[in-house]
Image: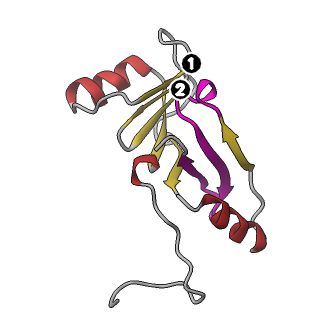
């Protein structure tokens, strides 16, 4: 296809759009939810931690990570890519010399706000944290 870059060996990741998100750190989860959920209209899709004091809340495309000490301008936590063939992608990264910051792990629903998933964290060449994940309940 014109304009599309293909890997030389023909491999490509199988994207799971529902798992793809960017995580940002917020000092005040209530203010963040007012902005993203109440004003913009994004529904809350997951909550991790106690309902009255969660440590993370997800809305479509974003994970809001509670960090009372975050300073403005340093809010990006990680970019997450939903990858259906996560085992293959992690193996390719490992084989290329990238060491997983968090090795591929299966997480049960009680651990991650009600979703059964597999996830791993790597750092890209610039040091950005990248989460690879697949929801196993889809």
Q: Quadrant of residue 108?
A: top right
- Packing grade of label 1 (10 A; few <14, some 14-19, many >=20) is some
Vertical comparison of 64 with 19: above or below: above
- Locate residue 91, reporting x and y percent: 72, 66
Vertical comparison of 1 with 17: above or below: below
- Locate residue 94, reporting x and y percent: 76, 66
Quick one: 48 or 12, which is closer to the camera?
A: 12
Q: Are marks 2 and 1 in contact (CB under 8 Å)?
A: yes
Residue at the spot of label 2: 113
Identify which residue is drawn at 65% across, 66% down: 88
Q: CA distance from mark 2 to mark 1?
A: 7 Å
The local secondary structure at tag 2 comes to loop
| Left or right position of 104 against 28 | right
Residue at the spot of label 1: 49
Residue 60 within the magenta-colored segment of the rendering: no
The local secondary structure at tag 1 comes to loop
In this picture, which residue range is highlighted in magenta?
108-135
- Packing grade of label 2 (10 A; few <14, some 14-19, many >=20) is some
- Locate residue 119, reporting x and y percent: 63, 47
Q: Earlier in the sequence, mark 2 or mark 1?
A: 1
Identify which residue is drawn at 69% across, 71% down: 92
- Locate residue 72, reporting x and y percent: 46, 36
């Amino acid at each position: 296809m014109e304009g599309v870059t293909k890997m030389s060996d023909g491999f490509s990741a199988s994207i799971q759009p529902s798992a793809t998100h960017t995580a940002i750190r917020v000092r005040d989860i209530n203010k963040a939810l007012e902005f993203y959920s109440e004003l913009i209209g994004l529904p809350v899709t997951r909550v991790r931690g106690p309902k009255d004091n969660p440590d993370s809340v997800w809305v479509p495309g974003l994970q809001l990570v509670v960090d009372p000490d975050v300073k403005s301008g340093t809010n990006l936590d990680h970019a997450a890519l939903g990858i259906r063939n996560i085992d293959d992608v992690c193996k390719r990264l490992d084989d290329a010399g990238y060491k997983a910051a968090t090795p591929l792990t299966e997480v049960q629903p009680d651990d991650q706000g009600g979703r059964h998933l597999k996830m791993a964290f790597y750092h890209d060449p610039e040091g950005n944290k990248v989460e690879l994940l697949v929801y196993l309940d889809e």
